[in-house]
C-alpha cells in the first residue's frame, strides 16, 4: 500500500475517537460551532407600563400636544402583572386599523396603577371605576384635560381576545370631529386682516 494512503488511514482512525470526546468543541471550536450557536434563554420582554413614570406630568404633556394637534387623550390604566393589559397593548400596536386611529386621533398615556395603590388620585379625579371594573381601563380626555368618557374594557372583549369592531367603534365615537376648513380659514382671514398680516394656506392630509 502506498505510504501516503497508509498515513491517511492512520490519521482518520486516530481522529474519530478524538472527535467523539469533548475535545472537539474545546480544542477545535469550528466543530463545536453548532452547539455554541444554539439559542439561549429568551430575553425578558420590555414592561408595558413604566412603573417609574410621573403619570400626572405625562398626562399634562399629552393634553398640551392634543390641544395643538386637534386630538384627544386616551388614558390606559393597568399594570405589568395584568395579562389583559399586556394583550390590549399588543392589540393596539399590531392591529393596523386601530394603530392608525390611535396615531392620528389620540395621544396615548399608559398609567401604572401598581396593585391598585398607585396613581389613585388620577383615577378618582377622572371618575374611573377601576376597583369595580378592573383593568385595563380607558379614560378619554378632551384638549383641556377634562374627562369626557370612561370605558370598562371588559365590554370590548370577545372570549379570550379583544374585539376589533368594538374597539374601533369606541375610538371613532370619542375622537374629535374633523376641523371645518371653511370656518378655520374665515377665522384666520379675519384675524390676519385685524393684525395687518397675510394667511399661509397649507393643504395636506395626515397620510
Image (cartoon, grey):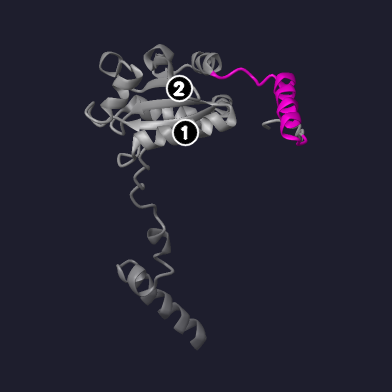
Q: Are marks 2 and 1 in contact (CB under 8 Å)?
A: yes
In the image, farthest residue toward the bottom:
3
Q: Is residue 110 above or below residue 43?
A: above
- Residue stretch in magenta: 175-198
Instruction: Classify 10 Å Cα crowding around label 2: few (below 14), some (14-19), many (20 and above).
Output: many
- In the rendered structure, does residue 132 fall within the stretch colored magenta? no
Task: Give the residue number, with chain letter if any, for mark 2.
Answer: 141
Q: Nearer the viewer, residue 33 or 173?
A: 173
Q: Is residue 159 above or below residue 63?
A: above
Judged from the image, the secondary structure of the residue bearing numbered disc 2 is strand
Task: Give the residue number, with chain letter if any, for mark 1.
Answer: 62
Q: How many numbered dots are placed on residues in this image?
A: 2
Residue 155 in view: yes
In the image, farthest residue toward the top:
155
| Residue 26 image offset from top left, x and y in percent | 33, 71
SS majority, magenta: helix
Residue 1 in view: no
| Residue 48 image offset from top left, x and y in percent | 37, 36
Residue displayed at 54% across by 24% down: 98
Judged from the image, the secondary structure of the residue bearing numbered disc 1 is helix
Q: Which mark is residue 114?
A: none
Q: CA distance from mark 2 to mark 1?
A: 10 Å
| Residue 110 image offset from top left, x and y in percent | 39, 32
Residue displayed at 35% across by 26% down: 77
Quadrant position of residue 34: bottom left
Position of 186 with respect to 63 (left or right) is: right
Quadrant position of residue 78: top left
Q: Is residue 132 above or below residue 39?
A: above
- In the rendered structure, does residue 189 fall within the stretch colored magenta? yes
Residue displayed at 50% across by 15% down: 170
Amino acid at each position: 500500500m502506498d505510504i501516503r494512503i497508509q498515513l491517511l488511514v492512520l490519521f482518520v482512525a486516530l481522529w474519530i475517537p478524538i472527535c467523539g470526546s469533548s475535545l472537539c468543541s474545546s480544542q477545535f471550536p469550528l466543530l463545536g460551532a453548532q452547539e455554541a450557536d444554539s439559542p439561549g434563554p429568551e430575553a425578558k420582554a420590555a414592561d408595558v407600563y413604566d412603573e417609574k413614570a410621573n403619570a400626572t406630568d405625562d398626562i399634562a404633556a399629552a393634553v398640551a400636544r392634543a390641544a395643538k394637534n386637534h386630538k384627544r387623550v386616551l388614558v390606559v390604566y393597568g399594570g405589568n402583572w395584568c395579562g389583559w393589559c399586556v394583550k390590549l397593548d399588543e392589540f393596539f400596536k399590531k392591529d393596523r386599523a386601530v394603530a392608525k386611529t390611535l396615531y392620528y386621533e389620540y395621544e396615548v398615556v399608559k398609567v401604572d396603577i401598581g396593585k391598585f395603590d398607585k396613581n389613585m388620585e388620577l383615577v378618582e379625579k377622572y371618575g374611573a371605576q377601576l376597583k369595580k371594573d378592573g383593568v385595563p381601563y380607558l379614560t378619554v380626555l378632551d384638549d383641556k384635560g377634562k374627562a369626557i368618557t370612561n370605558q370598562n374594557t371588559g365590554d370590548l372583549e370577545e372570549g379570550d381576545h379583544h374585539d376589533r369592531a368594538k374597539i374601533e367603534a369606541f375610538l371613532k365615537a370619542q375622537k374629535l370631529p374633523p376641523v371645518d376648513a371653511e370656518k378655520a380659514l374665515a377665522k384666520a382671514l379675519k384675524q390676519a386682516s385685524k393684525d395687518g398680516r397675510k394667511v399661509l394656506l397649507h393643504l395636506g392630509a395626515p397620510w
